[in-house]
Image (cartoon, rainbow, N blue to C red):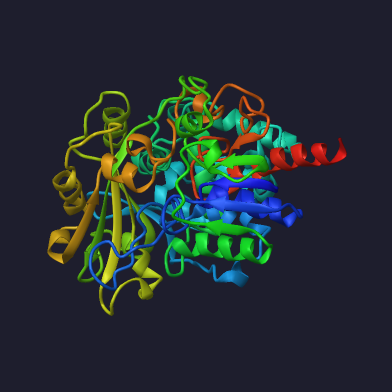
Amino acid sequence: MLDAVVVGAGPNGLTAAVELARRGFSVAVFEARDTVGGGARTEELTLTGFRHDPCSAAHPLGVNSPAFRAMPLARYGLEWLHADLPMAHPFLNGTAAVLSRSVAETAASFGPRDAGAYRRLVEPFLSRWDTLAHDFMSLPLTSLPRDPVTLARFGLAGLPPSTWLMRRFRDERAKALFAGLVGHVMAPLDGVATGAVGLVFALAAHARGWPVARGGSQSISDALTAYLTDLGGTVHTGYEVKRLDDLPPARAYVFDTSPTALARIAGFGGYYERYRYGAGVFKIDYALDGPVPWTAPEARTATTVQVGADRAEIDTALRAASREGRAPDAPFLITVQPSIVDPSRAPDGKQVFWAYGHVPNGWTGDLTDAVERQLERFAPGFRDRVLARATAGPPQLAARNANYVGGDIGTGAASGLQLMLRPRLSLFPYATPHPAVFICSSATPPGPGVHGMSGHNAAKAVWRRLRGLNQS
């Protein structure tokens, strides 16, 4: 009998498997797709030689992940590549605010009226970032805080809505960039704890940047798989699990799936019926005949570029998708241009480019024209660079990855208490009604992102159970 079976070979499932294997437990992973990866894959979606990331592409949380940093993933081929700027936010006048590794450079891009306010906001936390990241991403009850005072101060700053935090700023440049940071989790700006979302992304950039993985996000999943294999674990692909009886006997089962899929497979009925899924996304992967012709020079040197004219436009777009049930006319876009630092992703002189906007959950329309009109505002002539495009709305995204219910790439709405307490209001979010069944997906704390910490935290709960069984 195996000690643990993991269902789903995304970053969280693989991380959970590695953490258990490192402690001497026998582990097997079962993945429905023919390859591992989940939200960290790389495929030729457009033309031969153009390697795209179907979901996550830039990894501020991955490079800062306490779980990943404790693993020898570089030995298995994972290499982080950093552009001159982690992120840029261009404006219609051809200038840009930036999120730089340097706090001073970032503050200067906001202008003199907000530079001091930004430094006062981030510098007290940045000096304690590694401890804060561990405490923030390990909650709840997976380990005692190492610096509870700093964590409490962070909570005071981050728990209110981001609209409260943005009152510190006087000009539009800082407000727009910070609003865009919040938009990465598809949450309206006035949601509880959205200030913390923006702060975490900003601090992560200052600490270690917003890199891409050489060769594509698939290299993260491949490195985790290779490490797991060396530890004695096994991975089975092309193996769809429809019920627990499909799996071999084990002392624990760990699911890197959506809560509703887990309930269906394990027979939990309506246990997660109150769990809410959030807005979906409409994503376009481009093969380009050269770099994006951004008007703002800073955007040409950043791996990630946020596209939204100002805070009001971003807020309108997020509200349309999350609360009003309609696709925005001027979508807020998150874009990534990996070819700036990784020429291996496309043929010589060509580039891959990645962009998505927010749409209602399950939306079946086509946002291509709205996305490209928005890009043309900030990069005139963009359409002339397009060689090919691959579009994916909510139905296509859900078909590629069953965890993306209705196109929700965060596997659950990041709004209200569900941003922090997910998938249920519980002090033990990785546990389920069955004592041997656990959940480790992005539907559990600390939530969305390629960082493996949901898997790391769930693995702690699992090995405590296994250790208790060994002692009984």
Q: Looking at the picture, does residue 50 appear above or below residue 40?
A: below
Between 385 and 429, the one lying in front of the other is 429
Residue found at x 47% / y 36%: 258
Given residues 379 and 124, the one toward you in this image is: 379
Is 304 situated above or below 110? Answer: below
Q: Is residue 341 left or right of residue 50?
A: right
Residue 286 percent coordinates (x, y): 24, 60
Q: Residue at x 31, y 64 (%)?
A: 300
Does residue 205 appear left or right of residue 135 in this picture? left
For the C terminus, which image quadrant?
top right
Residue 146 can be seen, yes or no: no
Residue sitting at the far bottom = 348
Q: Camera-side residue: 138 or 298? A: 138
Q: Is residue 48 left or right of residue 440?
A: left
Q: Say whether residue 1 is visible.
A: yes
x, y percentage for residue 30?
Answer: 53, 50
Q: Position of residue 59 (x, y in %)?
A: 48, 55
Count of marks overlaid on the render: 0
Q: Quadrant of residue 411?
A: top left
Q: Position of residue 150 (x, y in %)?
A: 69, 37
Please name the residue shown 52% across and 21% down the image: 271
Image side of residue 319 versus residue 20, left or right: left
